[in-house]
Amino acid sequence: MGLMQALKSLDAFPRAEEHLLQKTKSGAFVSIVGLVIMATLFFHELTYYLSTFTVHQMEVDLKRGETLPININMTFPSLPCDVLSVDAIDMSGKHEVDLDTNIWKLRLNSDGHIIGTEYLSDLVEKEHAAHAHDDHKDHHEESDHKIELHSFDKDAENMIKKVKQALANGEGCRVYGILDVQRVAGNFHISVHGLNIFVAQMIFEGSSHVNVSHIIHDLSFGPKYPGIHNPLDGTMRILRGASGSFRYYIKIVPTEYKYISKEVLPTNQFSVTEYFSPINEFDRKWPAVYFLYDLSPITVTIREERRSFLHFITRLCAVLGGTFALTGMLDSWM
């Protein structure tokens, strides 16, 4: 019995004798309110514990020999698909769009509804390839040259009629797909540069009549992760007066997103600065939408983390104990 008495003396929770306790309606009301508050705080703390938060870290980018995926989804409401071309050039001057490039063009009517689909394995300016082959041809083969010239004139005439009819019908074009380019500074642009200059002149009757109004539905450099914000998504630039060229100067930041499951998602985020240069009637330049990108030497690592269980228990004891003490004080005042 001596041991039991010693244990009773260590009891830190004094209890009033049963005949001193009196149950009241106000006490029952305060108890119910206290239980509701405790339950609410418990579920709030549990949700807070189960949720994740992100930690950002920066370090030098050590990646080499990888490709940079460029996701494009744009609409040109005032240009038919037959005249649009995509060209990507890196810092060394090489065309890189023919590396695993998948581009689709959708013909749109004046109401924006799809009326046709065209798949292009690579949308490089055809004139570059034509000029490159011409340098190796024998210029003394005049008969072959006359045949090709006649064929070109016929094809060009058909192209002019087709495009003029599309312009008269108010056709537009939606370009979407993925460009895989080298991880070096470069640019890609969407324009009418793929046309022969004489054909383009006969179609538009001057560069100032080329309307490069566009809507950027999606432009990203890799897969999306939770919380990412691509600043060009939803951008709309509609020209009402004189035409011109749009230039988007993009700074790409390599990013790695590490999920709570230890899965790593390599991607990129970017910032952008926009510039517009108008074109007059006597300017020899043709309007285009340029995306000039450069890569940051710093990579950002975003890591998902969860709060510790001991932290959860500490906060839980604090809020539940505090609520119990507060309701006890309120009961005594009542």
Image (cartoon, rainbow, N blue to C red):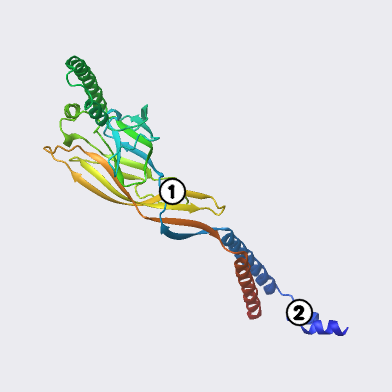
Q: Tell me the number on the disc at residue 50.
A: none
> Residue 267 got which mark?
1
Name which residue type carries label 2.
Leu
In this view, the residue in front, 234 or 127, is 127
Is residue 60 rendered to the left or right of residue 37? left
Quarter of the rendering containing residue 164: top left
Tell me the residue at 65%/72% (across/down): 30
Q: Residue at x 52, y 57 (%)?
A: 304
Q: Is residue 11 visible?
A: yes
Nearer to us in this view, 240 or 66: 66
Residue 129: percent from left, percent from top = 27, 29
Query: From the viewer's perspective, is residue 33 above or below residue 251?
Result: below
The quarter of the picture where residue 92 lies is top left
Answer with left or right where residue 237 lies relative to residue 177.
left
Question: In this view of the protein, which residue sits in the foreground, 81 or 135?
Answer: 135
Instruction: Please tell me which of labels 2 and 1 falls first in the chain.
Output: 2
Q: Are marks 2 and 1 in contact (CB under 8 Å)?
A: no
Find residue 40 and report its horizontal and vertical position in percent: 61, 63
Quadrant for the C terminus in the image: bottom right
The amino acid marked with disc number 1 is Thr
| The residue positioned farthest toward the right in the image shown | 1
What residue is disc 2 on? 21
- Helix, strand or loop status at disc 2: loop
Say which of marks 2 and 1 sits in front.
Answer: 1
Above/below status of 161 relative to 238: above
Q: In which quarter of the image is the N terminus?
A: bottom right
Q: Identify the residue shown where x is 26% and y is 39%.
A: 213
**Mark 2 and mark 1: Cα distance apart in space:** 66 Å
Name the side, left or right, on which 257 lies relative to 70.
right
The answer to whether residue 237 is seen in the rendering is no
